[in-house]
Amino acid sequence: MLIPEVRQKWANPINTITIGATPEEGGTRTRTVTVGGSTTLPFLHFEGKIPHRPALAMEVQDITPKDWPEILGEHFSDVWDDPGRWAKKCVDQLGADLVCLRLAGCDPDGENKSPDEAAVAVKSVLEAVGVPLIVWGCGDNDKDNEVLPQCSEISAGERSLFGSITEDNYKTLVALCKADGHKLIAESPVDINIAKQVNVLATDLGLDPKDIVIYPTSGALGYGMEYVYSIMERGRIAGLDGDTMWAMPILCDIGKEVWKVKEAVSDEIAEWGDQSQRGPLWEATTAYVYLLAGADILIMRHPKAVSEVKKYLEKLIESK
Amino acid sequence: MIFIGERINGGFKDIVKAIKEKDKDIIKKWAIRQTRAGADYIDVNIGAVSNKVKDYIWMIETVQETVPTPISIDTNKLEFVKEALKLCQKTPLINSTTAHDEKLDQLVPLAAEHEVGLIGVCMDEKGSPQDVNRRVELAAKIFTHAVEKGLPPERLFLDPVIMPLKFLQPQAANVLEAIRQFKLLSDPPPHIGVGLSNISSQTIESRLINRTFLVMAIEAGLDAAICDVTDTELVNAAITAELIKGEHIYSDSFIKAYQAAKKPGVGD
């Protein structure tokens, strides 16, 4: 029997985005990270091109995290009072492609650090490592609009990835990133329509759609992951089909979600098995699923999860 | 939706003047206006103004030196089509063949060889179709001929032939039903396109009729139209109809999102 032709030819490739700039490009990075550019759905090598491997970022914060479980603390407590040293460990010892500096310390309900302090943290990470940066605010719109301008200016030309803009708060960050040559994370609350709308709003202000990475919000395994998966899949199909407002690479914030769910964190229920295995496995499994849904950048925390996902990725890329 | 701008046509007085006086500005103005309005193709039709191929070539060259939008080669003269194909820079559309054997034998191989699109109008030497079945019969004839000669469904546009609502009212409903049946010819189906403005010929509420009919035809399965692309309400209604059918992902600024995807250079 003749097997029918199943290969599809898509109208549009997914946008290619390069994060980080070398000295020749106006920055100080020793290497850059390029993602996107696919002309097919994830890992369908027989159908189209997948020119760039998804990238793994490891998370660093500007404060010693209070809510990270011991299983993470045992890997990072020696460095987590210093974002520069923490970042260096992630890159030199754990193989991170990028560092995500989350400015959790700026949260007005927490330590309420100043814009100056945040800028110092950005600077120290830039000096400590040569990989590109993701700089993510604390999530409070007003505070982020005070803090991120300083962080953007101090790293002008570095082509970092800044987060995040939302439907209600995008003007400041769009203007900043255009001025300082950074890229942007466009965030939406597990909503395919709002994801598109944020991109329309940002590009309407003159931002190049190719400077945007979509963050559709992530959920951990067991916590709404399938909703996010279907949004990513539908959005990616639309992007490949010619919808330029869904043709961006996608970022998933894995560690932040996984390391707050009891299945990863709890060591109180004996029948759940060894937490030192289960926790990283929960993070890696969540990451595997999002890679298959189309993720281009993953932000992760546990070293073992990162190394397992890297191995898995190499196999997926080799499978062509 | 594939929009084909109808305005550069020898049926319009300003275009007659442009051709006779070789006034490029008039042609250029409509090329730009229609491109800005989102035309995927610029239809170029010399009408009865001249039967010289060099005048037709002049029209196409004038459009091409102004905008990057592909041309819809709208003529019933084979010689004109052949000359136009030689100079089109972007993949054009041949507008059109009928189901007449002689026309099919000339134009289908030409479209297949040049890898361009072809509009197949569902009429033949016996004239225009008066009911649904005749339209489907002619569509099937054109479709079969195209597939046999190597023109794939994605480059074929079937036209069920719109007639003026004012004079042939029952034909409007026949066209809608024919569109539904054309969709069943293959999977994926061929494109289905119409010359929209015929529906409102000599009516007072022409824009309202065009707009309403286009939305209904899109619901039935239409995906291309030769129309007044500078009529913003018409174009926006079509985009909205496709949105309601689920062909685009909703966003509050869905018109802007659609336009962003249509910027020249994207997806061609």
Image (cartoon, rainbow, N blue to C red):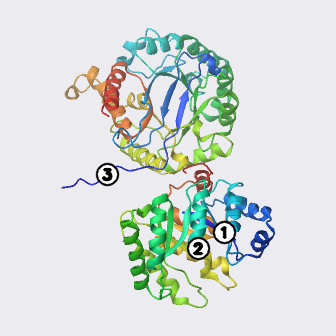
Q: Position of residue B156 (x, y in %)?
A: 46, 66
Q: Position of residue A14 (x, y in %)?
A: 49, 41
Disc 3 target residue: A6
Quadrant of the image containing the N terminus of chain A: bottom left
Front-most of B72 and A86?
A: B72
Indicate which disc, 1 or 2, sits on the residue closer to the N terminus. Answer: 1
Does A137 appear above or below A38?
A: above
Residue at mark 2: chain:
B
Q: Position of residue A164 (x, y in %)?
A: 57, 34
Tell me whether circle 1 and circle 2 mark residues in contact (CB < 8 Å). Answer: yes
| Residue in the picture at 65% in, 31% down | A177
Dot 1 alpha-carbon crowd within 10 angstroms: few under 14, some 14 to 19, many 20 or more = some
Asked if badges 3 and 1 are on one and the same chain, I answer no
Does A208 appear above or below A75?
A: below
Whether residue A191 appears in this view of the structure is no
Quadrant of the image containing the C terminus of chain A: top left
Asked if badges 2 and 3 are on one and the same chain, I answer no
Disc 1 target residue: B53
Query: Given this view, does label 2 or label 3 mark the residue nearer the observer?
Result: 2
Does A28 appear above or below B10?
A: above
Dot 2 alpha-carbon crowd within 10 angstroms: few under 14, some 14 to 19, many 20 or more = few
Q: Position of residue A213 (x, y in %)?
A: 53, 36
Residue at mark 1: chain:
B
What separation in Å lies between label 1 and label 2 (alpha carbons)? 9 Å
Q: Secondary structure at mark 1?
A: helix
Asked if badges 1 and 2 are on one and the same chain, I answer yes
Instruction: Give amino acid for label 1.
Output: Val
Q: Secondary structure at mark 3?
A: loop
Does B120 appear above or below A174?
A: below
Q: Judge from the rendering whether residue B71 lies leftward or rightward of residue B130; answer left or right.
A: right
